[in-house]
Amino acid sequence: METMSTSTALSMTGMEDSRRVFQLVSWLLEYPNSEWWNLAELEADVEEITAPEPRSMLRSFLEVLANSDMEEMAERYVNTFDFRANTTLYLTYSSIGEERERGQVLVRLKDYFHQFGFEVTDQELPDYLPLLLEFAAVAPIEATAKAMRDFRGAIEKLRTELLKYESPYAGLLEAVLAAADRFQATDKFRAVGGLQAKEAGL
């Protein structure tokens, strides 16, 4: 009977940990509402994350939630993401100039999601960061790795802009980037391990 090596098991644990971060941040980047505003459940989810860096950043954001009411956070959300073009959650908005070119990119991205059974409705745009993170949380390993590579620059740019405003949402982007780094590293480790096992005839 085949057994999973310790290194492979740790690699998969790291990936699942990163996926948990992607899923949590996808919720926290949505407009504040009662569907996800449950601090006790959010805190429990954060404590399941084993990586210290993203866990610490998520804890800090939950502290902000704990010291705010939903109406206050809703106002902060709108002022941050809806009224400033440089901090929009639509990742291709500021990076692609022509509307026609952006439309083509969005169609390709929607088709890419569809390849993996992740459907985007006509009311949604596939470059919306919470939607992208939701995809990254459930997609096959290679698809998640590619999505996070392709949009890393846009996520970093958004993080930088949020830091300028000292926005607590910047910490969520920091958590995503840290989780993406860990996911990419474990994906490479997994690939190397698989090659070595193949060469060894395992």
Image (cartoon, helix red, strand yellow):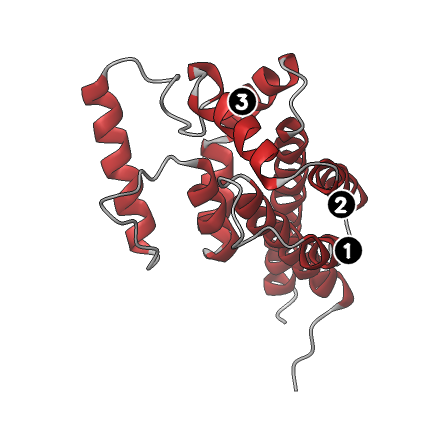
Which of 59 and 188 lies nearest the eye of the viewer? Answer: 59
User: Which badge, 2 or 1, comes first in the chain's sequence?
Assistant: 1
Residue under the image location 43 percent in, 24 percent down = 82
Disc 2 + disc 1, Cβ < 8 Å: yes
Q: Secondary structure at mark 2?
A: helix
For mark 2, what is the residue?
55
- Amino acid on which disc 3 is placed: Leu
Q: Are marks 1 and 3 in contact (CB under 8 Å)?
A: no
**Residue at 63% from the left image edge and 71% from the top image edge:** 202
What percent of the width, then of the height, locates residue 69? 65, 39
- Tell me the distance, in whole angstroms, between the alpha carbons under discs 1 and 3: 26 Å
For residue 144, above or below residue 1: above
The residue positioned 53% from the left and 22% from the top of the image is 158
Gap between marks 2 and 3, in whole Å?
Answer: 20 Å
Q: Please tell me whether mark 3 sits on a helix, a strand or a loop.
A: helix
Q: Distance of mark 2 from mark 1, alpha carbons?
A: 7 Å
Disc 3: which residue: 158
At label 3, counting other C-alpha atoms closer than 10 Å, the crowd grade (few under 14, some 14-19, many 20 or more) is many
* Type of the residue with mark 1: Glu
Which of marks 3 and 1 precedes in the sequence? 1
Above-or-below relation of 157 to 171: above
Q: Is residue 55 left or right of residue 180?
A: right
Reading the image, the residue beneath label 1 is 47
Dots 2, 3 in contact, CB < 8 A: no
Residue nearest the viewer, comparing 142 with 162 = 162
Q: Where 88 falls versus 28 (above or below)?
A: above
Mark drawn on residue 109: none
Give whichever of 171, 184 is nearer the camera. 171
| Identity, as a three-letter code, of the amino acid under mark 2 | Arg
